[in-house]
Structure formats: C-alpha cells, structure tokens
Amino acid sequence: MKLHEYQAKQVFADAGIPTPSSQLASDVDGAVAAAEEIGYPVAIKAQVQVGGRGKAGGIELVDDEENAREAADSILGMDLKGYHVDRVLVEEAVDFTDELYVGITMDRAEGTPVAMVSRKGGVNIEEVAEEDPDAIAREHIDPSFGMMPYQARKVVYDAGIDPELTRDVSGVLNTLYDLWSEKDGADAEINPLMVTSDDAVIAADAVMNVDEDALFRQPELAEMEEDAAGGDDLEAKADEYGFDYVRLSGNVGIIGNGAGLVMTTLDLVDYYGGEPANFLDVGGGAKAARIANALDMVFSDDNVDSVVFNIFGGITRGDEVAKGINEALEQFDEIPKPVVVRLAGTNWEEGMEILNEDLVTVEQTLEEAVQRAVSYADEVSEQ
Amino acid sequence: MSVLVDDDTRVVVQGITGGEGKFHAKQMMEYGTNVVAGAVPGKGGQEAAGVPVYDTVQQAVEAENADTSVIFVPPAFAGDAIFEALDTDLDLAVAITEGIPTQDMARVNKRLSETDTRLIGPNCPGLITPGEAKLGILPGNIFAEGNVGLVSRSGTLTYQVVDNLTSRGIGQTTAIGIGGDPIIGTSFIDALELFENDDETEAIAMCGEIGGEDEEQAAAYIDEHVDTPVAGFIAGRTAPPGKRMGHAGAIVSGSGTGTAESKISALNDAGVPVGDTPEEVADHIESFL
C-alpha cells in the first residue's frame, strides 16, 4: 500500500525527519489560506498516486495570492493520468543548493534490507541505478539487529556526500530505517533530500510503501489506506470482496484460482489473439458465494465482452465453483456476457454434473477454453 | 529415488488443530505420508487427525521422532512457527501459509543461514513424491510416479503443468512448490541442484513467474551446473509494470526488472526451451525422455 505524499510526510515528520511546513487543502480558498499562513513562495502539489506529477502539470510553484489561487483552481479537479485530483498539498518552497537521495528497501535476492544513498537526488533513482549504478552506495542491514550508526555513516561516506553533512544525512537515514522497520515498510525513500544554503537537510518529497501483509499490525497505517486507495471503482469493489484484482484494458474477462495460473490464463488470452480485461484471483478454497461475487465483478466491467473461468482445484472444489456459477447466472433473464468454464482437479466431475450447461460453455482444457472465450469476445466486438 | 520427502519422512504438523491443518493432515495421511504428531501451543495432550498433539515442536520431536514439519499457522504467527521449526533442528520445514509479513521473513531468512534445516515456502503448496508421500496441500490424484522433476513458484500452475504431463503418461520423481513470496527458503537453484543429483530424475520442468531475478539466476546456474535437460514456463508476460499480480513476489518493478522477457531470454540463452503454453512445456519434456 502506497501512502500519499502528505501522509508519508506526516509519518516522517512525526519520527523526527525535517520536512517543509505544509497543509492539505481540498478547495481553492483553503489552499490560498494555507499559502498565506505558510508564507510565499509555496509549492502547490496534487495528491494523487502517479509518477511524473510535475511534468503533467500537477505541481506549481507560486509567489503571491493571485498565482496561488490560479494554480489551486487549475490543479484541483484536474484529471492527472486518469486520477481525479481532489486534494493539494500546499508546501513551503525550500531554497536548496543540492539534492540527495536516501532510501530503504528489501533486497529480494539477498532476503535482507538494504540502505541506499546517492548524491544524484531529484531524478528518477531507477534511471540512475540503470545508467550509473556506482552513483548509489548500498549497505545491507541485519534485520535482527537493525541499522548500526556506523553503517549509516559508512554508506553516506561511500556515496561521496559532503563530509560537513555526514551527521545530518546519516541521522536521517538511521531514523528512516527505524521507521521502515517499525511500520513494516516495503520501501521508504526521500528523493530529493534537499541541502539548504545553511547546510541543513530537509525531506522535500516522501515515499512510503507499506507491506500489505503487515497491515493487521499497523492499525494507524491501515486507516490511511482508505484515503490512499483512490482511483479505479472496480479495484475498490475488489477490495471490498477481498479479491486480488488488477484491471487491464482488454475485453476478455478472466477469473481463476491461484496467481500463477491466472497470470497464465491472461498470457494465453494474449497468445490466442485476445486482450485480457483483468486479473482476478479468487484465492484458495473459494465457496459458491465468492465465485458469484467474482462473476459480478467481471460483469460490472463495461469493457468485458466474454468471460473465461479457469479453475484447477487443489483446496478449491469443483462442485462449489459450479454451484457459484449457477447461482450467479440463474438470476439473469439473459446472460449479460458469454461465460466459458473449464474445471479441473478436486471434484471436477461433480462440478461438471452440477453446472448448468444452458448458461455456460464448457471446455475440457485450458487452451480450448481460452480460445473459445477469445472468439466470443471477437464476435461481440464485431457487432 | 526422490528428493526431500519419501515414505520414511516423519511429519509434525504445526497448526494441526486449525481447520486447514486438520483437513490437510488427514489428506496427507490418506496419501501415505507418515504424519506422527501435531504441535499447537496450549493444545498439548489432545489428539487431532488421529495423532497426538504437543505444545512445542521440541516435544513432538522427542516423543515421536519427527524430522519434518509442515506449517499451517495463520500469517501473524507463522514467522514465529518457522523459527520454532528451525530452532528444533528438523531436516525440513514446509511453510504453506500465505501472507506472512516480509520483514518477518527477513528475520527468518537470517536464522535460516545459521541452521541446517531446509525451508520450503512460505506461500507454497508444498511438495510431493508420487506414490510415497506429500507434504502440503497438493491434490495427490493428479500426480503419477515417473522421472520428471518439477519446481514451481505457483501452486495451481504446478497442477496445470503436472496435469499436462500425467495425462500423456509422464510421471514425476518429486514436484516442489517453492512459493510465491519475495523471500523464500528454497530457491530454484536449490531445487535444480537436488534434481541434478537425483539418479531417477531424467528431465526437469521449471515454472517461474514475473518479479525478482530468481529465474535469471537459475538460468545462469543451469548453464554451468545442470546436465539434466530442463524445460521452462514463465507466467505473467502480459502483466503491467507496478501491479502486484496476486503473489507478493509477482511484480514487475517500475524500472522494468523482473519482466517475463528478461527471464525467457535468460533461460533460452542457457539452452532451456520455454513453452508459450503449459501444453508446450509438456511437449518439450516429452522430447527429452
């Protein structure tokens, strides 16, 4: 779960990391009042979860009331790469002499946290990593002991940061690690960490991704989740039903069990010339009601022209799946979109007996089921 | 021959009094697995799924000579349960649980490096040696005895590929689901090494997916160390960057690492054919035998 900038900044500030003074506003008057209180110049920043906000016109630097009003008016309500902007962060503009990068993440290959520091802040760090990997200094941290102060100093020295700043930057890094560790961070980064003319450092941006599997023990962050979600209505509905769901741009709806098999079903739709509309994993052991909810989800996506249901039962039982499909479809006078079903594994024979074949098309193999769904979708979209 | 599990394996089930634990303990026994005990704190002295329950794994080892644990403990407590298995010096621990916080697994990973216990998973279906024993939740009836080793990051995709193999008469030595999380105990490389050293395994099917660099590292390992022919499959060719595709580990990062293309080309460069469909993986395997 990714926090909004304003949420992450609050979390960082509470931990003692210096951040510019700022206020959240949801209307133009509120934004102007915030700017007056903070004092010009201020930055007005759209609070949406997309990269490249600045280039897309979502961040403006203003130095008087008239410009603040104009900027807030244009940013609030704008559509930024598909996301509606309903809040802005009004923030003190920092007069800086240099931009650094500090971050903590999990190094998957090593199975260990890693701290990263670079002098090349203010730009996309993933590009730096690709083009100039030596510009990022790294230090692996033993999660059982946490980051030792010397490790924070070492990685700051290794990055070639001005020695005058060692104490401040390593202090921020130590705090960031503790925060990441306490809050179950997936990534925590400050880019840029600005250096001011009087050699202080201040977090001009804040990124915090929280491990979704750990939200059960992070109640304060879980509360922020509702605010952080935003965006797609269908994805919000999937959250409500508790499905792993990703919306895509095609017209073949996909429902299955198990992430690897659902991804494979998507890939096969593409392989046979169709375009997947979504990834929907009902998970292990889904009962009839859950199966019916999954169909409801996919039917409510207007882009969908046909649906392929691919279940390979391990814990999930074919008879439960068949019951759910029948229940979901029998409530319609006319089936909204053609549904192709393929059942295999635990209790598949029982499932096939239960399944009402007047309502669905049954195929024996994954490959046949996908091809059938793709051809149905083609027929619908040609009409 | 087989790897890691056979009919001599003595299993303790951690979490045997829970719904999943009890159901799958019974299923494992029905398949022929030698389940000798359960371990659940506070439930010592009871019986579940027909075997005695102990308060600690240590007691189960002392009383019943268990050498392997299968873990069905809810995610909030599973990291602790894995620690208990590692600290009891078992040969093997298999963690089925999905949704363990990654930082808990980082600490487990550290302890793992200090013990001799092998960990499989978490977030995995377990492993099976057809005709002998299974550890975990795999549906036994789709497997058959034979000469193909199978290793996979995904549960149901494993079943799919096994089905493609079994339905054309190709059986398996052992099938291992290594799990879909970012931090797991047994990697592709570990599993490949086991199969390479197993006399009966004549071909290996390896099912990967997007995210991380395990498949790329496995490809480099195959190139150097594996003579047994390997066929591959990679799920997630159509996954958009930045979206988690179900598994916590299945995500293409913004900078483009972890893509299917990168994995497929690494495998091809190592001489491993990668099927466009599960059926094609079975075709390649058949051609090796």
Image (tube, coloured by chain):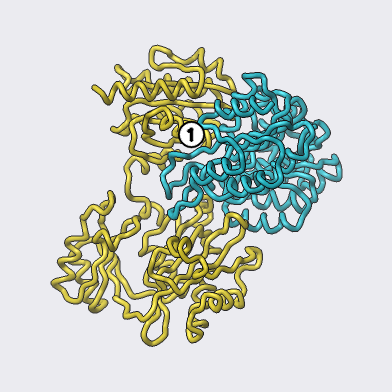
Q: Which residue appears at 43% of the width and 31% of the height?
A: A271
Q: Is residue B96 left or right of residue B42?
A: left
Give the crowd class for mark 1: few <14, some 14-19, many >=20 residues within 10 Å: many
The chain that appears cyan in the image is B
Q: Which residue appears at 28% of the width and 32% of the height?
A: A302
* Badge 1 element: helix
Q: Position of residue B286 (x, y in %)?
A: 64, 25
Q: Which three-letter amino acid code belongs to the residue tagged 1?
A: Val
Q: Which residue appears at 49% of the width and 41% of the height?
A: B246
In the rendered image, which quarter is residue A147 located in?
Answer: bottom right
Can you say which quadrant of the picture contains the C terminus of chain B? top right
B171 vs A171: above or below: above
Can you say which quadrant of the picture contains the N terminus of chain B? top right
Residue B248 in view of the camera: no
* Residue situated in front as seen by the camera: B127 or A319: B127
Residue B167 in view of the camera: yes
Q: Chain of mark 1?
A: A
Q: Is residue A250 left or right of residue A258?
A: left
